[in-house]
Image (cartoon, helix red, strand yellow):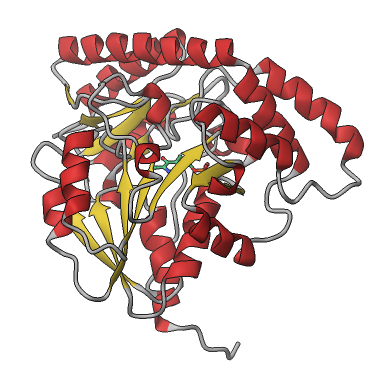
Amino acid sequence: MNFSIPEYILAIDPYKPGKPLAELEREYGVRSSIKLASNENPLGPSPKAIQAIQTCLQSLHRYPEGSGYALVAKLARKLALAPENIVLGNGSDEIIGMLTRALLKPQDEAILPQPSFLMYAIMVRSVGAAPVFVPLDDRLSIDLDAMASRVTPATRMIFLCNPNNPTGTIFSAETFEKFLGRLPLEVIVVVDEAYIEFVTDPQCARGTDYLNADRAVVTLRTFSKAYGLAGLRIGYGIMPTALSGILHRIRQPFNASSPAQAGAVAALNDEAFLHKTIRLVHEGLGYLSESLDRLGIAHFPTQSNFFLIDVQRDADDVFKQMLAEGVIVRSMTAYGYPHYIRINVGLREENERFVKALAKVLEKCEN
Ligand SMILES: *Cc1c(COP(=O)(O)O)cnc(C)c1O
C-alpha cells in the first residue's frame, strides 16, 4: 500500500499493556491465574458502581450527557473547586492526549521524567513534538532540579507523575514549590496523580493546591486504580478555566460514556469501598515487603499500590517463567530496567501465591 506516514509517528513505540488474564489462559492452557501487572484494584469494582451501571444500561440508546453534569458537580464539591476546572476523559490517558494536542506544535518540547508512565512520550510524539527525557535521581525519584534545568525557549509542558509509575516514589510540596519558582510562567506543568489515594507521606505534593497559582498546573486523576474501574475508562483533569475551555473545544462531545459517568458517581459515593481498598493495599505492601526481605530479594519503598523488585536476572525471562506459574507480572524492560519487575498488591492469597512462585522462579533462572 502506498501512503505516507509522518516520521514522528513512525518513531512511536506502541504502548505494551500488562498481559490480560484471558490471553494467558488461552496461550498456556492454565486456569485460575492471577494478574498483578497493571496496578488494578484486586477487590474488583465497588458494588455500588456495578449497581449504578446496571441501572444506566436501560438508557444506552441515548447519548450521554456531554457535559458530564452529575459527575463533574460531584467532583467539584468533593475537591472544593468550580465545575469549570474539571474536564472528564475516557480514562486520564485521554486527557494526556487532549493536552498534547491542544498545547504542542511540531518541534515544541515537553520535558518528561524517565522512566515514568509511557503514555506521556507516546502522546508528545503523536503531535510531532519532542520529548526531552530527564533520568530519575539515584533514589529513583523524579529529579525536579534536573528537569527545571532542561527548560529551553521551546519548552511548552512538563509531565510529572506523583507517585511515579513505575517507581512508587513521590516529591514533596516543598520541592515542588521550589521547582515551580524556577520555571517560566508560560510552561504548563502536568501532575499525574493516578495513585494519590494510596499515599501516606504527609509531605507529598498535591497538584490541586496550585490550581490558583499564577501559572497553569494541571492535575490528572483516574477511577482506574483505587476506585477499581479501569475497564470503564473514566478519569479527569483539574485545571484553570482558561485551559479547560481549550480542551472542551477539541474533545469528543461524548468522550465519557453514560455507564462511565454513572459508575464514577456511585464509586465516589462508596467511601467505605475506597477505604477498604486502601487498607488492603497497605496490608499487602507490608506482607510483600516482609516476604521479599525474608527471601533476600531487593525491592524499593513505595507510596503507591505497586512496587519495583530487583530480580537480578533478565526481567523478560522472569516474566515468562512467572506466566508458566499462572502469575502475570510486568517486566520493566520497556521502561529501561531490564532486571526489574513491577507488581501491584493483590488479595492476600494472590500475594502469597506470587511470593511462592517468585521464589521458585528465581531458583530456576540463572543470574
Ligand atoms: C494507570 C495510570 C493512569 C490511568 O490511566 P486511565 O487512562 O485513567 O486508566 C494514568 N497515569 C498513570 C501514571 C497510570 O499508572
Q: Dividing the picture into quarters, in which one does residue 263 lie?
A: top right
Numbered label tally: 0
Q: Position of residue 287 (x, y in %)?
A: 30, 9
Residue at position x 59%, y 48% in the image: 84
Above/below status of 224 relative to 272: below
In-front residue for pair 64/312: 64
Farthest-out residue, left:
138
Of residue 95 and residue 11, the one placed in the foreground of this image is 95
Q: Position of residue 298 (x, y in %)?
A: 15, 24
Image side of residue 68 versus residue 200, left or right: right
Look at the picture and state if 185 lies above or below 233: below
Residue at 60%, 87% (x, y): give it.
1
Q: Is residue 142 visible?
A: no
- Residue 232 seen: yes
Indicate left or right for 109 with 174 as reference. right
Image quadrant containing the C terminus: top left
Q: In the rendering, at what x and y percent does residue 234 appear?
A: 61, 41
Residue at figure coordinates x 53%, y 34% from the top left: 224
Quadrant assignment, res 211:
top left
Residue 311, relative to residue 151: is it above or below? Answer: above
Q: Position of residue 299 (x, y in %)?
A: 19, 25
Name of the residue lying farthest toward the bottom:
2
- Picture quadrant where residue 254 is located: bottom right
Q: Is residue 30 above or below residue 252?
A: above
